[in-house]
Image (cartoon, rainbow, N blue to C red):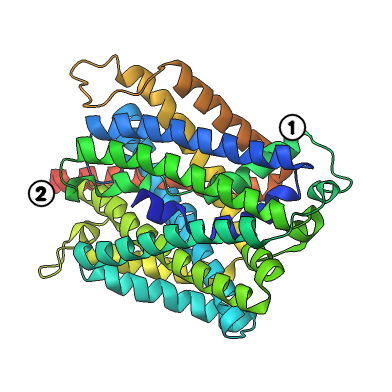
Amino acid sequence: MVVGIIIGASIFVQPSLITAQVPTAGAIHAVWLVAGALTLVGALVCAELTSAFPKSGGVYAFLREGYGPAAGFLWGWAMFWSVHTGIAAAIAMIFARFAAELVPMGDAAQRVAAIVAVLALSVVNYGGVRPGSAVQTALTIAKVGAVAALAAVLFTLGERAAPAATAAPGTPLTVQGFLLALVAGLFAFGGWHMVAYAAEETREPEKTIPRALLIGTVLVTACYLALNAAYLHVLPAERMIASTAVAADAADAVLGRGGRAVTAVLVVVSTLGALGGVILAGPRLYYAMARDGLLFGALADVHPRYGTPHRAVALQAAWATVLVATNTYGALFRRAVYTEWLFFGLMAVSLLWLRRRAGYAPAYRAPLVPVLPVLFALASGAIVVNEMLREPRRSAGGLAIVLAGLPVYLVWRRVAAAGRMSA
């Protein structure tokens, strides 16, 4: 599931955004290596916390244990209104962009196609974990094989771009530029934590999920490095920067128009696999919050036949379609990364004092604690601060969404307490 969620749309799009921010092939590879390393450290922290608290909700459960229910609520609030549903919407939009390579569509038609994808995969996941997981597994196997094949074709059949052409003309390497490129890279790694959302539906989650996180993250990093090296092998930097579909352009450069169509099929399959995983994971978070009394109780209802949190699936699908209809891809992914990594830093710090708590007994312990969690938290803080400096208005909007959840939480708790007293 980790590989299936992470390898989705972004690796076929984000290299253009990264190349625009950093000037050389070495710097581009460094961005992907750092993004992979940060994701691996986050996965190590998440693996330990999952083995200690194998409960539905993933990061929500960890923040609740580390800081209290308010922190968990704010995570869930942000996930629903902007982050998790925003990721689903962004992936669906990339699906539609590449589907338009096969069936020409304008902007309005692409948005309709993206909404259809969200609704169709929501229906699959509404019908049970087993059909959703079966679709996810099949798409994951197909996409990993296809990514490997694409990299092999580009390296073996493609003519090497001139060395001078692998540098972005006139772009100096700056700390701010590197961090902006890192944001784009981290979005391509997004979703690594989502496997923990369904811990209660996983066999031996304290063992299975840490293993999946570690193996999946390493495998995805290797795939990304290979594919980006292949892009740089055949495309000059200026063409990568201008591209909105870098994988298709790379295949087009090697195989001609037919290669572009084949790559479009690859990306369509890949995005559907990632989108299915995101749609599967999210409702488990809302289910956990409702069960804890932090959302409407109806969202904790399990379908009597399918055994899924069906109302949560439907609610998530409805809001994701709104985001598809009203946002751009760039706005969605930057807001998602900025908000997510704010909470990821808090999650890493929580590990430091959870290890001192009496009764804390994880089945797996992350290495190099406290060094790795502290470095991870500092990197998360740098990403958030840089985004605030670079895009103050958009960042303020994302932060406002998070903070708006606090008064809602306080009112909810008061109403819930009054209801218990009257009962």
Q: Earlier in the sequence, mark 1 or mark 2?
A: 1
Residue 345: percent from left, percent from top? 48, 31
292 to the left or right of 240: left
Please tell me which residue lies in front, 32 or 320: 32
Identified by mark 1, the residue type is: Val
Which mark lies nearer to you, 1 or 2? Answer: 1
Number of the label disc, if any, that sits on residue 175 = 1
Residue placed at 53% from the left, 44% from the top? Answer: 339
Number of the label disc, if any, that sits on residue 423 = 2
Residue placed at 61% from the left, 44% from the top? Answer: 183
Q: Is residue 356 above or below residue 7?
A: above
Q: Residues within 10 Å of mark 2 (few under 14, many from 20)?
A: few
Residue 391: percent from left, percent from top? 71, 46
What is the secondary structure assignment of the residue under circle 2? loop
Residue placed at 35% from the left, 18% from the top? Answer: 353
What is the secondary structure assignment of the residue under circle 1? helix
Question: Residue 69 occupies which quadrant of the picture?
Answer: top left
Q: Is residue 86 visible?
A: no
Residue reaching furthest to the front: 156
Residue 63: percent from left, percent from top? 35, 34
Residue placed at 26% from the left, 26% from the top? Answer: 364
Please tell me which residue lies in front, 160 or 340: 160
Residue 122: percent from left, percent from top? 33, 70
Question: Residue 45 occupies which quadrant of the picture?
Answer: top left
